[in-house]
Image (cartoon, rainbow, N blue to C red):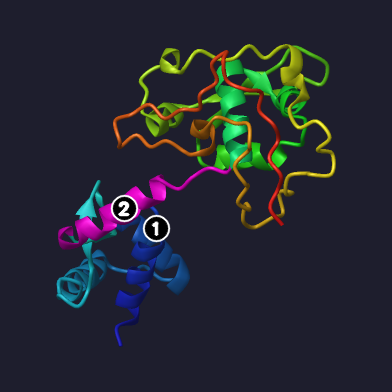
Amino acid sequence: MDFLQNHIEALIFCSPTPIKLADIKACLSEMFNADVPDDDIEGAIYRLQEKFEGDEFSFQLFQAAGGYQFLTKPAYQTSIGIMLKQQSKKRLSTSAMETLSIIAYKQPISKTDIENIRGVNCDYAVQKLLDRNLIEITGKADTIGRPMLYGTTTKFMEYFGINDLAELPAPKEFTGDVSTIGENAESKEEPTASTTEEPEAAAPENTDEASAAEPTATNGQDNTPDMDADSKDLKEPDAQA
């Protein structure tokens, strides 16, 4: 068994970016506490390239950006493309959509202000949106405590198929009765950050259907939540058990 080849294979496999020959040598020399000749490393890499050229493997060792990286073979790009497309179409929950809508129309906005509008804790929804890179921290407010301010990202516009925030539907004025969003919902707290999976939330009865379904950028239509002046006040949906 070629232990050197196996170690090099593991290094390349674990590297998130193409790993250079010098970095491979530095790792091996420290591990073996001895200098590893370049010829031995290059020979092991050549054998790995031959090994993964076989049809029994769906990936191959490629040389790119001055280093080496395992990548899937072109023959499998169709199935991989379908998987990536399906992942990009995963729906946001109702709570995440409501939080994202508020941020989109009121940015930059603090989490406290978001919670004042929705009437419930938004820690989990904000974190999910940050994880999906739909929102980002844009700065800090010039108020007591200097709370962080949130705004939408470029991915947000890509996600909803728009080129500019000006293309969003005319926002509903957040005044008057809108402050009653989530009224009497103190017992309907959102899941805490320790929850491993965000539960599905039922579509709110008085929310426009467009705000409950996540639009995609592939259908060529603007499916962003309808928040015009004629739409009814949003009500906090009942959380599913």
Please tell me whether mark 1 sits on a helix, a strand or a loop: loop
3D distance between C-alphas at marks 1 and 2: 7 Å
Q: Which residue is mark 2?
A: 18
For residue 93, what is the image quadrant? top right
Please tell me whether mark 2 sits on a helix, a strand or a loop: loop
Image quadrant in which the N terminus is located: bottom left
Pointer 1 and pointer 2: residues touching (CB < 8 Å)? yes
Q: Position of residue 138 (x, y in %)?
A: 59, 22
Name the kind of residue labelled 1 in the image.
Answer: Ser
Name the kind of residue labelled 2 in the image.
Answer: Pro
How crowded pointer 2 is (Cα within 10 Å; few <14, some 14-19, many 20+) is rated as: some
Image quadrant in which the C terminus is located: bottom right
Q: Is residue 19 visible?
A: no
Q: What range is drawn magenta here?
A: 74-93
Q: Residue at x 26, y 68 (%)?
A: 41
Q: Residue at x 28, y 54 (%)?
A: 82
Q: Is residue 122 visible?
A: yes
As drawn, 191 above or below 141? below
Q: Main secondary structure of the magenta part?
A: helix
In-front residue for pair 58/86 = 86
- The question of residue 27 being in magenta is answered with no
Q: Residue at x 81, y 21 (%)?
A: 145
For residue 99, what is the image quadrant? top right
As drawn, 173 above or below 78? above
Which mark identifies residue 15? 1
